[in-house]
Image (cartoon, helix red, strand yellow):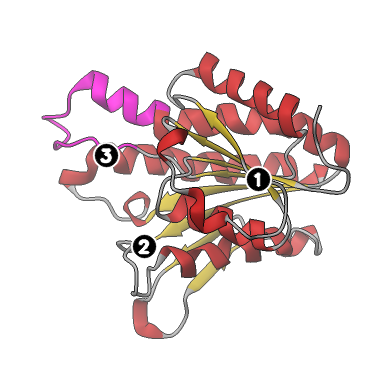
Amino acid sequence: MTESVGVRLAVVVGAGPGLGLAVASRFAREGYRLALVARNPDKLDISRLAGLPGPPPLLVAADVGDQAGLRGAFARIRAGAGDAEVLVYNTSLWVPGTPTQLDYDAFMAGLRIGAAGALVAAQEVAPAMRAAGRGTILLTGSGVALRASAGSAGLAAAKAALRSLAMTMADELRPDGIHVATVTIAGVMAAGTFYDPELIAATYWDLHVEGSGPPDRWRAEVIYTDQGGKSPARGTE
């Protein structure tokens, strides 16, 4: 094992060029070592992480829709960087079509990538978090889980499943000191807007910090929205 003494590990599954790397950068600025999981990690532009505190990120290739492959990726992370204190699951698949037009295999792929992969990832990190009596699991949700349209049926089903998974995991793991929450992004991400990934990433850090406080104050969901222009987020316990 090559874990640096005193260096905490954050694993980001779905470390794409937008929100994934923005969240990774936020945790790196706080001194966390990073393990970044992506289908093609060699294509990631990690230059934005250069010069930040902590060791260089560990890049791990995995297809999150493949249970065995994803579990293997976490085994490589544990061998190369130790146990995760933070897990961020930030993966989904857009599946085109209305409910009566959806291709079955594509729909199931969307569920595997959008929700089942999160289940696998959480199962991989939970044992060590339980043993440590602390940890944070954060899942990237979407407003379509709350208000879906016919054209977003595939993504909406996956995000609704992910949201329910977050709520049930929060209920299960809170007594073990593990803070689980979903960040439900109720808008289209774009740089320079309210939904700039760099701004949204701050919510992930805030939820992690929240985990050091009383469990009865932990939120299982933050809805990141500019509705009314008054608040960037509202939470539910």
Residue 233 on image: x %, y %: 49, 71
- In the displayed structure, does residue 115 sit left or right of residue 177? left
The secondary structure type at the circle numbered 2 is loop
Residue 237 visible in the snapshot: no
| Residue type at the position of mark 1 | Pro
Q: How crowded is mark 3: few (under 14 residues within 10 Å), some or many (20 or more)?
A: some
Residue 7 visible in the snapshot: yes
Return the residue nearer the eye: 180 or 60.
60
Residues at discs 2 and 1 in contact (Cβ within 8 Å): no
Residues shaded magenta: 93-112
Q: How crowded is mark 2: few (under 14 residues within 10 Å), some or many (20 or more)?
A: many
Residue drawn at x 18%, y 23% as measured from the top left:
103
Residue 137, compared with residue 3, is above or below; it is below
Q: Mark 3 sits on what residue?
A: 94
| Residue type at the position of mark 2 | Ala
Q: Residue furthest bottom?
A: 230
Residue 83, compared with residue 49, is above or below; it is above
Residue 64, compared with residue 114, is above or below; it is above
| Residue type at the position of mark 3 | Trp
The secondary structure type at the circle numbered 1 is loop
| 1 vs 3, front mark | 1
Q: How crowded is mark 1: few (under 14 residues within 10 Å), some or many (20 or more)?
A: some
Residue 36 on image: x %, y %: 56, 40
Residue 18: which quarter of the image?
bottom left
- Quadrant placement of the C terminus: bottom right
